[in-house]
Every structure is written in structure tokens, then in C-alpha cells.
Image (cartoon, rainbow, N blue to C red):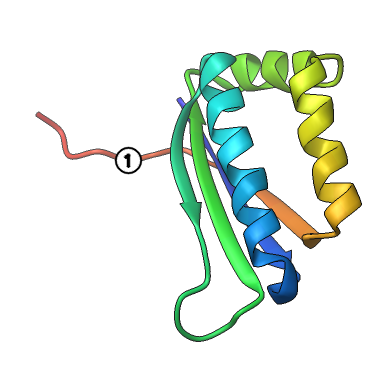
Amino acid sequence: MITIHLRYEIDPDQAEAFREYGRRWIVLVERFGGTHHGYFLPSEGDSDEAFALFTFASLAAYEQYRLASTTDPECIAAYEYAKTTRCIRRYERRFLTPLFAEA
């Protein structure tokens, strides 16, 4: 299992556009077999930082999703939406392995 952690630097004036971008990707990640754990938007403190977490069964499954997303019309539209609205200034991606309590 692999969890992807995304840290976004967003344009605070485009927060609503970023929300729309997030709504689109939650559906897309799940359509491609991932589990989306949500987007976490600014509330208090920094107004230009947001996060997202989603999980795939394996790094290979994530890589398949990444490859498929380059030709999927809805994924392309979501990328273009972010580009057009300029709601994202930059982002960082980290790969994490979750640790759960042993049963």
C-alpha cells in the first residue's frame, strides 16, 4: 500500500477554483482504483497552503493511474482547469507507507 501526500501552494484569491479542482480529482482518483482521503484546505494560519492524501494498493497501481491520467479526457480537463485558473502556484509530492496498529 502506498499513500501519496500532496502539499500545494495555492493562490488564496483562487480558493474556490482550487476547491473545484479538488472535487474533480477525488472522483478521478477513485475511478482509477485509488482511495482518496480528501483535500485539506486553509482554515486558520497560512492561507496559501493545502494538502491532499490518497492511497493506492501499490506503487505499481499508482504508476498505472499516473500513466492513464495523461490520456484520460477528464484528467486532462482537470489539469487544464488548474492551469487556466492558476489556482495552484506549486506542489510537492511525497510517497508514504501507512503504519496501522497490529491486530
**Secondary structure of the residue carrying numbered label 1:** loop
| Residue 32 image position (x, y, % from top left) | 59, 15
CA neighbours of label 1 inside 10 A, class few (<14), some (14 to 19), many (20+) = few
Q: Is residue 55 above or below residue 71?
A: below
Q: Is there any visible trace of residue 94 in the rendered image?
A: no
Q: Is residue 60 above or below residue 91?
A: above
Residue at screen point 59% across, 53% down: 19
| Residue 46 image position (x, y, % from top left) | 58, 83
In the displayed structure image, the side of residue 57 where residue 62 appears, left or right: right
Quarter of the picture containing the N terminus is: top left
Please give the count of numbered marks on the rendered protein. 1
Residue at screen point 81% across, 17% down: 73
Quarter of the picture containing the C terminus is: top left
Identify which amino acid the numbered label 1 is placed on.
Answer: Leu
Residue at screen point 73% across, 74% down: 13
| Residue 27 image position (x, y, % from top left) | 54, 27
Residue at screen point 75% across, 57% down: 91
Q: Disc 1 designates what residue?
A: 99
